[in-house]
């Protein structure tokens, strides 16, 4: 049974299509990153998965049930971008209150440890920093030991050290056989912490696979050099080249065959090539190429 199954799901607000015919499945025990530009439909999709809003069309199943049923059974834990903590309660009181709502919650001390909150357990929620509040929201999300953990921009407001500790805790939770779906704007987080990446744009899936597969799919490498005042004519016709970018006199060739491109650059052009650099395409490059293509 899949953890998540969306079949031709759409959500419209008048003439605005936030999600447009989205179909995907997500196996249990996977850690999946959901990427997309602002307005791509990520948060809308997450809210529909949680039963917070209803789709205009299509069907959503979570562990074979409706989102409402899965939530009622304590099978989903969520950490959303917004949410006010009860300021008068201490961190310990707040987490313990929430965990007692679930049929088989994690031990309180384990939750505090996983969210790196042991030293803050006695502090009132109203006295926490933005990053500390995010860690409390993570603790609330895992308190009930949910089978599916859904995170929407989980490391917003966290500093570098807190983000590193957070992802360590998330990987520990996922390693116990839980399913994790997270949306993030930090593309390096998706690259490092997921075993599958789904890219959405304009409410539809535009890429789905491992980070390595997605990077390879838009051109495996980039060849850069100083162009100066020379003409760039014909560079797009070189073997393997899938795209040409020129910024401040520096040209970057996206290529699916770096060896053929470099060989042709020297043998088939009269350019004076200086400062040659060869780099692998990172997830940010792939993300921009995919989403810009979808927008076009």
Image: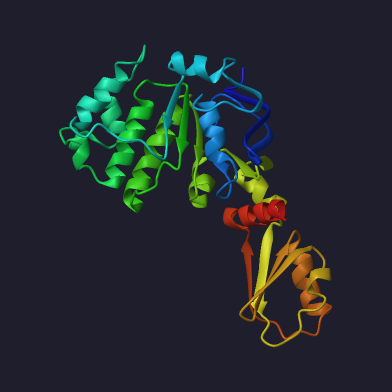
Q: Quadrant of residue 49?
A: top right
Q: Which image quarter holds the C terminus?
A: bottom right
The residue at 30%/27% (across/down) is 111
Q: Residue furthest front?
A: 14
Is 168 above or below relative to 226?
above
Q: Residue at x 25, y 46 (%)?
A: 129
Please tell me which residue lies in front, 174 or 58: 58
The reply, left or right, for residue 215 in relation to residue 165 is right
Q: Coloring scheme of the render?
A: rainbow
Task: Please tell me whether residue 218 is drawn above or below residue 210 in the rendered image.
Answer: below
Q: Is residue 272 above or below residue 132?
A: below
In the image, residue 110 lies at what x, y percent?
28, 26
Residue located at (32% from left, 32% from top): 114
Q: In the figure, is residue 17 to the left or right of 34? A: right
Q: Residue furthest bottom?
A: 229
Residue drawn at x 25%, y 36% is 117
User: At which x and y percent is residue 224?
Assistant: 65, 72
Q: Is residue 129 above or below residue 120?
A: below
- Work out whether residue 134 or residue 9 is closer to the camera in this orientation and state it: 9
Give coordinates of residue 65: x percent, y percent.
57, 15
Quadrant location of the N terminus in the rendered image: top right
């Amino acid at each position: 049974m899949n953890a998540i199954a969306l079949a031709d799901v759409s959500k419209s607000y008048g003439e605005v299509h936030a999600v447009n015919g989205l179909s995907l499945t997500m196996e249990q025990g996977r850690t999946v990153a959901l990427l997309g530009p602002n307005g791509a439909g990520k948060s809308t999709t997450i809210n529909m998965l949680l039963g917070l809003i209803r789709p205009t069309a299509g069907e959503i199943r979570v562990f074979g049930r409706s989102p409402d049923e899965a939530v009622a059974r304590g099978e989903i834990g969520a950490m959303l971008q917004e949410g006010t903590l009860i300021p008068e309660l201490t961190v310990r009181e707040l987490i313990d209150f929430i965990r007692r709502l679930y049929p088989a919650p994690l031990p309180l001390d384990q939750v505090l440890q996983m969210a790196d909150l042991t030293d803050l357990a006695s502090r009132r929620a109203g006295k926490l920093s933005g990053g500390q509040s995010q860690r409390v929201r993570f603790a609330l999300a895992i308190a009930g030991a949910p089978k599916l953990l859904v995170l929407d921009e989980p490391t917003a407001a966290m500093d570098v050290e807190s983000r590193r500790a957070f992802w360590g805790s998330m990987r520990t939770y996922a390693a116990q056989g839980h399913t994790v779906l997270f949306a993030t704007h930090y593309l390096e987080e998706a690259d490092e912490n997921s075993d599958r990446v789904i890219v959405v744009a304009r409410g539809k899936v535009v890429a789905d696979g491992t980070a390595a597969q997605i990077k390879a799919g838009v051109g495996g490498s980039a060849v850069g050099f100083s162009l100066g005042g020379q003409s760039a004519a014909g560079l797009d016709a070189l073997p393997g080249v899938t795209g040409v970018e020129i910024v401040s006199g520096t040209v970057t060739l996206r290529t699916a065959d770096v060896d053929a491109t470099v060989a042709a650059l020297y043998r088939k052009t009269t350019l004076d090539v200086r400062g040659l650099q060869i780099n692998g395409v990172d997830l940010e490059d792939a993300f921009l190429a995919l989403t810009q293509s979808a927008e076009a």
